[in-house]
Image (cartoon, helix red, strand yellow):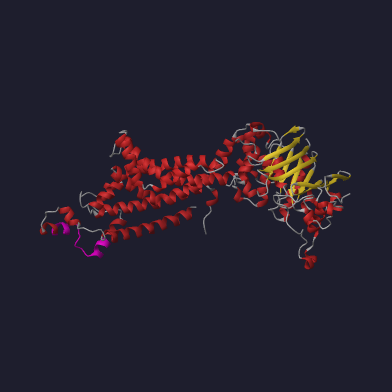
Amino acid sequence: MARYLTVRALLGLIAISGVVLLTFVLQFLVPGDPARRVAGPRADEVVLQTVRANLHLDDPVTTQLATYVVRTAQGDLGVSYQRRRPVIDMLLERLPATLLLAGAGLVIEIVLGSLVGVWDGLRRRRSPALAAMNILLLSIPTYTLGFLLLYVFGYKLDLLPLSGGPGLPELVLPALTLGLFGVPYYASVVAESIRVAASSPYARTAVAKGLTPRQVMRGHLLRNCLSPVITLAGLDIAIYVSGVIFVESVFGWPGIGLLAQESFVNLDRPVLMGTVILGAVVVIGFNLVADVVRAYVDPRTRTDPA
Amino acid sequence: MSDLAIVDVGVSYGRFVAVRDVTLAVPAGTTLALVGESGSGKSSLAHAIARLLPPGTGLTGSVQVGGRELASLRGRDLRDVRGRVVSYLAQDAMAALNPVMRVGRQVGEVFARHQGLSRRESAGRAGDLLRRVGIQAPDLVARKFPHELSGGMRQRVMIAIALALAPEVLVADEPTTALDVTVQAEILALVRALQAERGFAIVWITHDMGVVAEIADDVAVMYGGRIVEQGPVRDVFAAPAHPYTRALIEAAREQPDTAAKARFLTIVGQPPAGELPSGCSFHPRCPVAIDRCSTERPGSRLIGEGRHAACHLAG
């Protein structure tokens, strides 16, 4: 396991390096002049020149790349064009809010998805009502669902704040939007796992021991459903992170996603690149964690692949 | 220990009838081998005896252990009987053990459930039990997961689970089919030794005539959901009365070197699935069938000391 993790961590580092390079290239594809953004629409050419020089925008691309790579490797993500603050500080400042939102959404989708999945998996036939709900949830894009929830609970019923954060009342709607979107996936995976487990010979052995249905469920079926759930969470994380960015923008939740959106609009390249790199680190790190947890839950995956 | 008596047992899955009117007796301390092709209904009958048929399956007739009726038990009463009065030994131990639970706990669970022992006490009992089924270093093995054990070890663990509470009846559903021959011999010897010591009755499902000769006192041959012949193994093997039994025994005796001519001596045709043929179920495949066989179903008749056969030409 230790060797496997080392290999995985090294691969992750290579992937992050790739992301760093790709982000650097991509920033030049974003239209607009960062210097103009900083200096304002009425600034004259002299001011613009000064700003460009200050931001090192006039350096040759190779020099810019070299500086960027060396700095990033040292953990220095540069300084925001707009706020003149270290990007790393801005990211760390926003991170707790994003972790709170992402965590809440993940708990909602896994807990709700698993409950619905277990309920469906124990039925002899799939529930048609559940199938309809799945299709409905799957076909609604995240932001539509977000606006729908906002309209109903924030505006019409006036139960919850329309935007802002990072407090608990503001958390409910964005977390729900993120979570509900994932429920059909987890519900399907859990239902199928329960079905397979319930008709397995080891379930029959458990019944033959005289265990109660509850003991069979808790001791034997549920644990065998954990592994696919963790696998799904690992696979889903990239899409989930992009969902977090969307949802933060819709609900004005002051996290990394909103920061990414703001920096994109402001052509604040260091900040934008910082958020992308952080996203990559989170996705790769989460996958590593998912691997470790799965190995803990399912002993069959513990052996090192040769 | 008590005798097992099966009277007029039938098993049906919806409209499909898998087992019809089966009556058998297995005295305590003896072994009955139940043989037949795939689809003959032997596994359904095994699950009926062990009360492990899936929910919604029709079970009729009577399954009695020492005069106590099992067929009508439900809920808590049924759960109390499972593992304590009647135990089940599955075919594929790898699939029949929970892949994510250490084997020691899977054994100990039985004590926790039926005797209310704590986890620690159960673990101690599980260790003793694993030693009894011939596992050296039981404490080490108890901490392993099923995939870390050999096939023979896994089946020993299954035997430990099945016999943990000294049940009156053991239903063994081809437990040695997945094992290689030497391991199979070890497992058969182990079960025989435990039976000699404790005196439980065994119903052993198999399609391997070698295993029948090895372990059973009596044999019952199933075809199309019915018992077509039963009697002491020695007598049935010496002089099979039903053409189907004859064919099974000859197919098993066929030696590889004589197979040059006939390749394999097989029973021509397929066992019936769904609708049974008229008259005797076996008549379409029977080499000696007469006209009467296609119209009139032969009942089971006494044809000798403890021997029954359902064939117009028997006896």
Which of A34/A9 is in front? Answer: A34
Residue A192 image point, x, y percent? 53, 46
Q: How many marks?
A: 0
Quick one: quadrant of the N terminus of chain B?
top right
Q: Is residue A125 left or right of residue A170?
A: right
Q: Nearer the viewer, residue B291 or B44?
A: B291
Q: Nearer the viewer, residue B66 or B97?
A: B66
- The dominant secondary structure in magenta is helix
Q: Nearer the viewer, residue B127 or A169?
A: A169
Q: Is residue A39 magenta?
A: no
Is A210 situated above or below B36? above
Picture coordinates of residue B220, whole percent (x, y): 79, 47
Which residue: 80% across, 40% down?
Answer: B25
Residue found at x 28% / y 50%: A260
Q: Is residue B216 visible to us here?
A: no
Q: Magenta span has A50?
A: yes
Q: Is residue B268 above or below residue A135?
A: below
Examine the rendering and report whether any part of residue B136 can be seen.
yes
Q: Is residue A94 left or right of residue A292?
A: left
- First to last magenta residue range: A49-67
Extreme residue in the bottom direction:
B260
**Left or right of A156 in this view: A226:** right
Q: Quadrant of residue B169?
A: top right
Residue B291, percent from left and from top: 84, 54
Measured as percent of width and height from the top left, residue B10 is found at 73, 41
